[in-house]
Amino acid sequence: MTKLQSYDVAIVGGGLAGLALSIQCAQQGYKTIVFEKEKYPFHKVCGEYISFESWNFLEELGVPLSQMNLPAIRRLLVTAPNGRELEHDLPLGGFGISRYKLDAVLAGIAQEKGVEVLQDTKVTDINFENEMFNVQCRSLSGSIFNARSKIVAGTFGKRSNLDIKWKRKFVSQKVNKLNNYIGVKYHIKTNWPRDLIALHNFKNGYCGISQVENSEYCLCYLTTAKNLEKSGNSVPQMEKQILCQNPHLKQIFATAKVMYETPITISQISFEKKTQVHDHVLMIGDAAGMITPLCGNGMSMALHGSKIAFEQLHLYLENKIPRGQMERQYTVTWQKQFGKRLKTGRIIQTFFGSTFLSNLLISVFKPFPSLTSKLVSQTHGQPF
C-alpha cells in the first residue's frame, strides 16, 4: 500500500460537480485531487440539456461555450402516451452539449490549473479522524493507496459503492414511486428542430430528445425496472412494446440512426431525499439530491451546487469559520436553493409515471400557457 501526499481538497467523482469544484479550488491555490473511476472521455446516462443559468459560470471556469456553436434550446414539446401534444416557449432556455465533450473539457481545464486528476481510480472508503480525512483508493490495475485531505467532497453521482457501504438511507428504502428506475441513453442522427427539446411520455416512463454538438441528438429515457422485467429484460423489446406505443417515439425509433452499438444504461436510480453532508463529507450534485430528469435541470444544479460548496469550504480553509459551521451553512444554502425544485420534481414525477395522469395533465395545461410557465419556473433557477 502506497500513501499519497496530503491535500487541501479531495473530490470523489469527476463529473460536472466534482470538476467544477476542483477548478474553483485550484484557482484559489488549494492543493486539489479528483478521483474518477472512468477514463475521459466517456459517455454517461444524462439528458445533456443545460439551463442557460449555468452559461456564465461555465465560461468563467474556462469552458469556451461561445466558440462551440452549440444549439440554443428555446422551446419545449411534451407529448402524452396517446400522442396529444403541448408546446411551450422556455422563458430562460438552455443549450445542448454531451457529457462526453463537456466532462473531458472540464478535466483538461482542471489539469491545466494544477488539479491532480486520477482516472481509472475507485475510492473504496473514506474515514475522518483528528480533523483529517483518509481516502482509500484502488486503481484499475489493482494498486491500493491512500490520500489525506482537509476537505472531502462526494460528487460521485446517483448511486455509488460508498452510498451502499455507508448505508445511506435512500439506498435501503423499499421499492416505491421514487426509486428503482433505470435510465437508457443513445446518441442519434435524426430530423429534429435544433431549438426544440421534447419530453415524450409512455407507460411508466418518459423519453427526452434534444440536440447536442456535431448535429447529433441525445435520446435519453427513464422508466421502471418493472417495465424492463415485463419485456424479458430486453431493452429493444421494451422499446418496441412499451415506448413505441407513443406515436412520436415510434416515429423516432423507426427513422433515427443510432450512433453507437449499444445504449448506455444505469439502474437503481432513486429520487428519495438525501443528506447534503455525511460524516463531514460534503455531498454535491446527484449525491446530494437528484431532481427528476423531466425537469431538465440536473446539470445546472450540479454546477451551482459546486459553487455553493466552494464558498463554504473556502471560508473554512481560510480559518474564518469552523468545520461545523461550514457544514451547516452549506446544507442550509443548498436546501434554500434546491429544496423546492426537488419537491416540485417529485410531484411532477407522479403525473408522468401514469398514462392516465399524463394524458390528463397535458389536456388540462394546454389551454392555459401561464400554468405551464409557472411549472417550468418552479424547476429552474437564475444565473449564478
Image: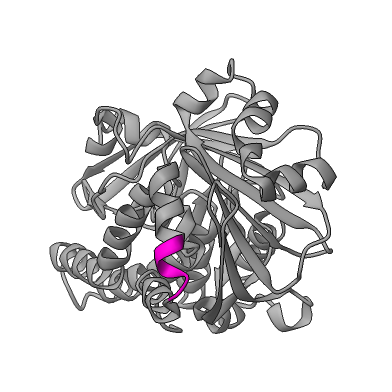
Q: Is residue 301 magenta?
A: no
The image quarter in which residue 7 lies: bottom left
Please say if 64 is above or below 11. Answer: below
- Nearer-the-camera pick, 228 or 140: 228
Please say if 269 is above or below 69. Answer: above
Q: Is residue 211 visible?
A: yes
- Name which residue lies at 30% across and 28% down: 175
- Name which residue lies at 33% across and 42% down: 134
- Nearer-the-camera pick, 291 or 122: 291
Q: Is residue 364 magenta?
A: yes
- Name which residue lies at 63% across and 65% down: 197
Residue 138's x, y, as percent?
51, 31
Please say if 80 is above or below 169. Answer: below
Q: Is residue 1 visible?
A: no
The image quarter in which residue 119 lies: top right
Residue 141's x, y, as percent?
64, 26
Residue 339's x, y, as percent?
25, 64
The image quarter in which residue 136 lies: top left
Side of 179 where 265 appears, left or right = right
- Name which residue lies at 51% across and 67% down: 20
Q: Main secondary structure of the magenta part?
A: helix
Side of 102 where 25 appears, left or right = left
Side of 86 where 253 appears, left or right = right
The segment highlighted magenta reads 363-367
